[in-house]
């Protein structure tokens, strides 16, 4: 199945390099060139990524420059991009045009959960995708998922035609009671669905480690913290693809160096990961992955992921000049104290974070 995919590592295009609030297309082109030259060919995007700029970057850096049979392109049907069944096809056609292709290799029902699954059922979104597959405009229909395992089981039972499941999966979330990575993985395996992994480094949290955790990995050799996180996910049976949202050419070079000839984790590496996981679980970090879904709908234009990142860095290093960076991230944008508690951010957050409460907690840290 999916023989056209060359390797089990994919380029997630949600965190592309930026220059003055625009995608750095020249750097993306370099990343695409390296990725393909090293034998990889799987690219993942969605209409809402980088506030609509990801699809356009895909067109400029990939689809205008390479023949269609040289890459695999995944896109998604996002909740806020349609309201009725009649909206879906025009939106889908607009995505093809934005990406510069005539078909998508994979098309996923995006960020499924108990709430929006009812909408997708009512608007016959899955049925429309299956019809588009018959027409040759989609090769494989799947879903990406953010909820409890029992909801995933319901969806896969309702629509057994689904071919692939994308879940959040990393060593920190594996037994997390909210994310339920292990349980979702087991449900997908029960239904015999190949699995795509998103957030293997948890939005960078498994890379930006405290010194004690870094020392544990450094004792193993010269590999990066990202290498252990990504290879952890790829080492499980049934994992078809592991995505990494790379933001620099250097990150790309690092990732492909150990995924080009993939080797599952060794026993000593698994042991090191368990030690690092214990340290991470003792921290009080905000579990934000930086997806930025919350930013687009914020009436006060608060850059929530950036502010949360400032807070997490301050926790790791109390001497860090976080107030300066908080000022940078709130310049011409809202501060935590500007939040009006409308709740739009929490309604769309894949991690289910209590964002309004966290913003209140941040105020005395950076605005006192």
Image (cartoon, helix red, strand yellow):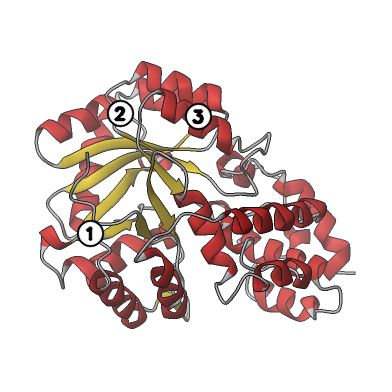
- Kindly report the distance in space between the C-alpha atoms of the residues bearing marks 2 and 1: 23 Å
Which image quarter holds the N terminus? top left
In this rendering, the label closer to the viewer, 3 or 2:
3
The percent coordinates of residue 157 (x first, y second) are 39, 17
Which image quarter holds the C terminus? bottom right
Q: Nearer the viewer, residue 139 or 84?
A: 139
How many other residues sit within 10 Å of disc 1, few (<14), some (14-19) or many (≥20)? Answer: many
Q: Report the residue at 71% width, 58% height from top.
A: 276
The secondary element bearing badge 3 is classed as helix
| Residue pointed to by mark 3 | 186
The percent coordinates of residue 179 (x first, y second) are 61, 38
The percent coordinates of residue 333 (x first, y second) are 63, 69
- Kindly report the distance in space between the C-alpha atoms of the residues bearing marks 1 and 3: 33 Å
| Quadrant position of residue 301 | bottom right
- Kindly report the distance in space between the C-alpha atoms of the residues bearing marks 3 and 2: 16 Å
The secondary element bearing badge 1 is classed as helix
Q: Can residue 296 be seen in this view?
A: no
Q: Which of 340 and 187 is in front in this view?
A: 187
Marks counted in the figure total 3
Relative to 86, 325 lies left or right: right
How many other residues sit within 10 Å of disc 3, few (<14), some (14-19) or many (≥20)? Answer: some
- 261 relative to 297, above or below: below
Q: Nearer the viewer, residue 24 or 210?
A: 210
Relative to 338, 57 lies left or right: left
| Residue pointed to by mark 1 | 99
The secondary element bearing badge 2 is classed as loop
Q: Do the residues labelled 2 and 1 touch (CB within 8 Å)?
A: no
| Quadrant position of residue 260 | bottom left
**Sequence-first tag of 2 and 1:** 1
| Residue pointed to by mark 2 | 162
Relative to 10, 289 lies left or right: right
Q: Are marks 3 and 2 in contact (CB under 8 Å)?
A: no
């Amino acid at each position: 199945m999916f023989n056209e995919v060359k390797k089990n590592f994919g380029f997630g295009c949600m965190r592309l390099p930026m220059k003055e609030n625009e995608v750095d297309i020249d750097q993306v082109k370099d990343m695409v060139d390296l990725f393909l030259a090293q034998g990889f060919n799987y690219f993942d995007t969605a209409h809402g990524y980088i506030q609509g700029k990801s699809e356009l970057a895909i067109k400029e850096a990939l689809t205008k420059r390479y023949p269609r049979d040289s890459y695999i392109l995944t896109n998604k049907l996002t909740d806020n991009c349609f309201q009725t069944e009649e909206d879906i096809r025009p939106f889908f056609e607009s995505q093809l045009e934005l990406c510069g292709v005539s078909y998508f290799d994979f098309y996923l029902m995006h960020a499924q959960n108990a709430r929006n699954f009812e909408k997708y059922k009512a608007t016959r979104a899955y049925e429309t995708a299956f019809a588009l597959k018959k027409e040759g405009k989609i090769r494989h229909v799947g879903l990406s998922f953010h909820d409890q395992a029992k909801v995933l089981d319901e969806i896969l039972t309702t629509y057994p035609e689904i071919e692939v499941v994308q879940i959040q999966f990393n060593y920190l979330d594996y037994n997390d009671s909210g994310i339920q990575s292990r349980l979702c993985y087991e449900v997908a395996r029960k239904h015999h669905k190949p699995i795509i992994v998103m957030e293997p480094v948890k939005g960078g949290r498994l890379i930006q480690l405290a010194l004690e955790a870094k020392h544990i990995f450094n004792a193993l050799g010269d590999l990066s913290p990202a290498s252990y996180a990504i290879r952890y996910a790829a080492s499980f049976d049934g994992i078809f693809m592991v995505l990494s949202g790379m933001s620099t050419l250097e990150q790309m070079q690092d990732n492909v160096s150990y995924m080009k000839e993939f080797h599952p984790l060794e026993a000593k590496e698994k042991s090191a990961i368990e030690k690092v996981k214990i340290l991470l679980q003792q921290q009080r970090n905000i579990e934000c992955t930086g997806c930025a879904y919350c930013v687009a709908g914020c009436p006060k234009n608060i850059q929530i992921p950036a502010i949360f990142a400032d807070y997490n860095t301050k926790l790791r290093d109390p001497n860090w000049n976080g107030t300066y960076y908080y000022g940078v991230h709130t310049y011409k944008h809202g501060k935590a104290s500007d939040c009006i508690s409308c709740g739009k951010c929490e309604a769309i957050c894949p991690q289910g974070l209590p964002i309004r409460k966290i913003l209140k907690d941040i105020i005395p840290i950076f605005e006192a």
